[in-house]
Structures are given as C-alpha cells and as structure tokens.
Image (spheres, rainbow, N blue to C red):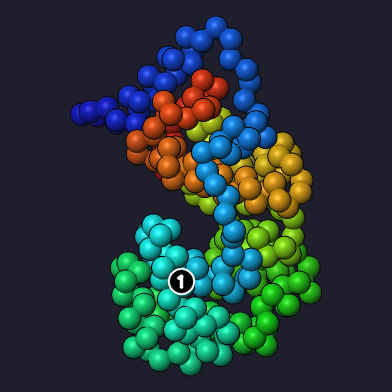
Amino acid sequence: MAGVNPERRRVKSANRNVRGQSSVDDLTLRGAVTGLASLYAVRGQLSDPLALIVWENIGYLIDDERRSALFEEFVDRVGLQPARIVHAPVPVLTDIARRGGMSPQTRVERLRLIGALAIAECDGDLAGRLGCLPLAKARTLLRKFPAIGDPGADKILLFAGIAVLPALDSNGLRAMVRMGFCAEEKSYAQTYKAAITVLAKDGETDAAWLKRAYVILREHGKTLCKRAAPICEPCPLDRQCAHRMVAKL
C-alpha cells in the first residue's frame, strides 16, 4: 500500500495515549451514553410511522438541517395522509425531490409508493395496523416500504411506541464498534445484529433510554466518531475508548 490511511494514523496515536494511562476504568455501554449526553441534545423526535418513513425518503445523503427543511415543506405542501401523498401533483413532488440529492425522479416514485402501500396494506392507517400485528409481521410490513431495512424498521417500532427494542443507524453502529462494544463483522447486517445484541444485554430496557441511546450514539458518529477522520481529543470517552479501526462502517 502506497500510503497510510489518515484514520489509521489517528487511531494508532490514540491507542498509544490510552496505553500510556496508568489507570483507566473499563467503559460500559451505559457509561458511554451517559458520558456523551452532555455533548448532544436529545430533542423531540418524530413518532408517527408514516412520518418516519417519509423522513427517510425525503432526501439522499443530505444533512439533517436540509432533510428537516424538506420534510417540513413536504408536510406543508402535501401532508402526511396516504391519499394526499398518492394524489399529490407530480410537479410539487418533483420540486421538493430535486433539492434532496441525486435521483430526484426515483425519490418522487418512492414517495408516492409510500402512500400507495399505506393504503393497500393498512387502509391508510399504518400506525394502527402496526400496533395490531405481532412484532415479526410488523417488521415485515415496514420492510415493504422504500429505504426501510431491519435498522429502519427497528427505529420506527421503537420511536412509534410499538415495541421496546434497541435500534441504531450507521453512525451509531460505527461508534459502538470504535468504542469496543462489538466487532465489525463480515457484513453490515451481522455487525448490526451484534451491536443490537449488546444494546439489549448491557443497555437499559426502557424505551426512553433506548431512544436516548439511539440519538446520542448517532450524533456521536456524525460529529466526532466520523468514518474517515475521527476527532478523538474533545471526546470525553477518549481515554476509555478502544479506538478500533473500522473498514466499511
């Protein structure tokens, strides 16, 4: 290899610092969430399943500020009723979609599909339908919607108050691996499953803590524990963190 990855240099340096400390307490998952809480505000989160699905589909590879603005515009101009989404004028959907990143036409089709699926599968009441289904079937239903895999389904089930179960996005998953709570496996799905198992075993079991952990770990992965260039020095967990390398997260 011609050069050394900048992240590799940074993590090696951090590892030397950690080894140089004479007394470092073991980092626990609950302790990590508590230790990071002062850095990241846990504001009000969406709780309606259909709104959460629209949120995921309103843009592609855009920051939260832009996503939030586009989502609010969608609510104002289209609404979150399935029938209104299905019958929304294409120019309106296109106008919003083109500001949400690449492939706007695909995004228009997906937004309309969200409304159509909510009508076909749930008679327009996704939240009500999910609440009546066994957990496995509720997850299967959610995976029918565009851009919703197991991680997205878990998030919706948790934040909509349908099930008390752990959830992570890709940023939170990376933070979990870096801190040493689980290993990066051969596939994203395997790594996610390993991290969720740790959250279920070592985290708190109430919905409020699981939601807080989701938000805090996600923000940490976005802000300091970045993929290409983690910023370790300002992190309150730097001395306890395992500083593990990540290859694909």
**Amino acid type, callout 1:** Phe
Q: Which residue is drawn at 39% across and 32% down?
A: 231
Residue placed under numbered mark 1 in the picture: 71
Could you tell me residue 234's position as x and y percent?
A: 43, 29
Could you tell me residue 23's position as x and y percent?
A: 58, 10
Q: Residue at x 53, y 27 (%)?
A: 237
Task: Classify the position of the C terminus by image quarter.
Answer: top left
**Vertical relation: 87 (above or below) 69:** below
What is the quadrant of residue 45 in the picture? bottom right
Task: Classify the position of the N terminus by image quarter.
Answer: top left
The reply, left or right, for residue 106 in relation to residue 49 is: left
The answer, for residue 215, to whether it is visible in the render is yes
The answer, for residue 112, to whether it is visible in the render is no
Could you tell me residue 99's position as x and y percent?
A: 32, 71
Q: Which residue lies furthest to the top in this view?
A: 22
The reply, left or right, for residue 162 in relation to residue 237 is: right
The reply, left or right, for residue 54 in relation to residue 91 is: right
Q: Is mark 1 on a helix, strand or loop?
A: helix
**Vertical relation: 160 (above or below) 88:** above
Could you tell me residue 215's position as x and y percent?
A: 57, 49
What is the quadrant of residue 197 in the picture? top right
**Vertical relation: 7 (above or below) 63:** above
Comparing 39 with 130, the one in front is: 39
Q: Which residue is drawn at 59% across and 59% down?
A: 44
Q: Residue at x 51, y 20 (%)?
A: 239
